[in-house]
Image (tube, helix red, strand yellow):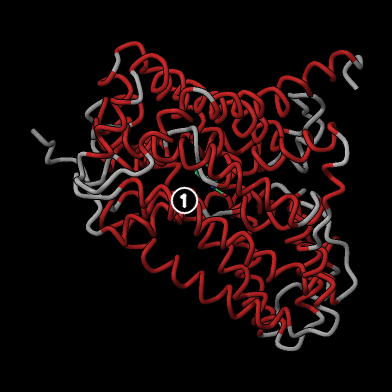
Amino acid sequence: MENKQRGQFGSSFGFIMAAVGSAVGLGNLWGFPYKMGKGGGFAFLFLYLIFVVTVGFIIMLGELAIGRKAKMDAVGSYKSIDKKAGFVGGLGVFAAFVILSFYCVLGGWVLKYAITFIGEMFGAGFGGVAGADYFVAFITGTTEPILWFALFLGISCFIVLAGVEKGIEKYSKIMMPALFVMLIVIIIRSVTLPGAVEGLKFMFKPDFSVFSSFESTVAVAGTALAQMFFSLSLGMGAMLTYGSYLGKDENLQKSALIIPILDTLIAILAGCAIMPAVFAFGLDPSAGPGLMFITLKEVFASMPMGSFFGFLFFVLVFFAAVTSSISLLEVICAYFIDSKKMKRKNVTMMAGLAVFILGIPVALSQGMLSGVRPIMGMDILDSFDFIAEYTLMPLGALFMCYFVGWKWGAKTITDEVASSGYPFKLKGYFSFMIKWVTPLLVAFVLYSACISPIVKYFAGGGQ
Ligand code: PHE
């Protein structure tokens, strides 16, 4: 019997928007363009696409199918198939807490910039302070980073509180198409700036010299694969949980192809929006938050109608971030609702409070707590990111490959996919990959992004 209490997506389009919303986030907007430029342009894209096909598609389909088969949260789903596998879901719920605690802090920064750009349109925004000074003063503060973090988290809770169809689906259906339109407007603005073409060259130059040595190939491959994991929200139960809200008639094979395609497309388009503008103003395309909050702020400051475009851009980033954070929050909420039989309202408030408490040290990690360096000399924010992105997510995916490919047999999953009645053309491919190729590649990320740096760190005497 189907559990009537559980939410369900109202339409296939709504589900795709929610899943693409989960995938498209800060990872696409500030990770991808830079890594692509640095990692050899087309060479990086080429590797990335290979990993989407060999790893992304397989894990995505596996997660969607496990969720839809069991119609439970991550822990309950694994458990219902195999009593011993519940811990894989548990790792996912834990990862969701860790990711949320830093993701919502970053989301808070984005929100602050979106609102400040509104002020800027009316002459009361950044107050003429230079990009870097403004940013550093803000993130090293105490009250402001916590307040904006709380606001972003509060908005995420508000959406999740309304449920799957009336919350997650409804907002994703508005925000994702809006994001797309805003992205196009910003690309048009960006590529028509004088000198913009250099930015496109930076991203797309086909530089296959990264393949010239084994070491650099491995390094770029590791970056591309880890980036893909985070960007596609894999290995921690987000796609599994969304899959559990799908009806039996959904074509999972098609979804597992469309979601990565749209995610990659938006990552490339994000690069086309950001890099041309950065180069047009002769600025440095360096990585991470700095690119978005310092460099781009300078770009908007010197652009005609810059405050308006700045506002538009940060609203876009906010939409991307919030549709990702609700999927993280839903992993936690689904667990307490399904497995612990609690009410959505109570769970959302409790989870929100727990994330808030966990996130306070992250919000303070650039200022008051900048001396606290829990892992390999990294501050609290980077340490949390490291635990989630480079440890918990690949580990979760590896366990999934083990259970599906080796313990249960791929048939448990391929039968579920085929049960919709659509031809499952990639069945043989899926069964082979999940047993042999995908786990090897995932183990490679775990090794190159997690184990090897730790070993090197300790071998170097903690330097
Ligand atoms: N995919 C999101 C991004 O690219 C992050 C995310 C990871 C969301 C894991 C949900 C689960 O920003």
Quarter of the image where one finds residue 459: top right
Compared to residue 198, the image places residue 18 above or below, namely: above
Q: Is residue 396 above or below residue 301?
A: above
Please give left or right for residue 242 compared with residue 187 in the image: left
Q: Residue at x 50, y 59 (%)?
A: 262
Q: Is residue 341 left or right of residue 457?
A: left
Q: Decide: few, some or many residues near mark 1? Use Cα within 10 Å; few <14, some 14-19, many ≥20.
A: many
Give the x, y percent position of residue 231. Answer: 57, 47
**Which x, y percent locates residue 343?**
23, 37
Q: Secondary structure at mark 1?
A: helix
Q: Residue furthest left?
A: 1
In terms of image quadrants, where is residue 330?
top left
Q: Can you give x and y, in whole percent of width and height, for residue 382 in the image?
A: 72, 36
Count of residue discs: 1
| Type of amino acid under label 1 | Ser
Q: Which residue is denoted by mark 1 in the rendering?
A: 22
Is the CB–ligand 1 distance for label 1 below 8 Å? yes
Q: Nearer the viewer, residue 300 or 89?
A: 89
Left or right: where 437 falls relative to 46: left
**Residue appearing at x 83%, y 85% in the figure:** 194
Tell me if residue 69 comes above or below residue 33 in the rendering.
Answer: above
In the picture, the quarter occupied by the C terminus is: top right
Residue 396 in percent (x, y) is at: 50, 25
Q: Furthest residue to the top? A: 84
